[in-house]
Image (tube, rainbow, N blue to C red):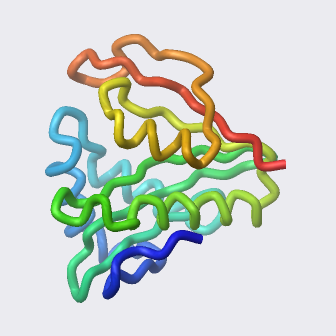
Amino acid sequence: MTEPAAGVRIRQMTYEDLPAVMKLEREIFPEDPWTEGMMRGELDEQPRTRHYLVATDGDEIVGYAGLAAAGDQADVQTIAVRADHRRAGIGRTLLSMLLEEAVRRGAAWVFLEVRADNAPARTMYERFGFERIGVRRRYYADGTDAYTMRKRLR
């Protein structure tokens, strides 16, 4: 597993993290952020079918990620890292941990959607072995397409 920058810790997301996570969500995804109700709904399913993590630097949440898993399929629901903490291994660590959880839960495949205009994220996913399998036209609120990607785990 990739290690994040010194001082950054990864732990399971809790309901108490929601205010900070939602603030980041609105900063990172201003065009189409999840609502607090959506995120709370995800946490309601943890650990049954969901696995959510936060990355902290000291007392601050600087990133988060989530996985949905059922049967032999898992989906990366979200990965976000605060702009001033990018390129420090946090996203890679979060993705590694989500993939480890998918394996632990018996998934054979992991799927995700990524903005077509987010080259850094697409590059990271490709480095982890994800392949592009389709396009969802005008998927995001601002009309940007999403690429669907998948990775075979077993």
Residue 47 coordinates in the image, percent (x, y): 61, 68
- Report the label total: 0
Image point 36% across, 73% down: which residue? Answer: 55
Residue 137: quarter of image:
top left
Residue drawn 44% across the image and 36% down it = 122
Q: Is residue 124 left or right of residue 58?
A: right
Picture quarter containing residue 75? top right
* Residue 112: x %, y % from top left: 54, 37
Residue 106 vertical placement versus 139 (above, below): below
In which quadrant is the N terminus drawn? bottom right
- The image shows residue 147, relative to residue 73, as above or below, that is above
Q: Depth check: 120 or 58 in front? A: 120
Q: Is residue 74 above or below residue 95?
A: above
Q: Residue at x 52, y 70 (%)?
A: 2
Q: Describe residue 19's horizontal placement relative to residue 87 as left or right.
A: left
Q: Nearer the viewer, residue 45 or 112?
A: 112
Q: Residue at x 26, y 15 (%)?
A: 143
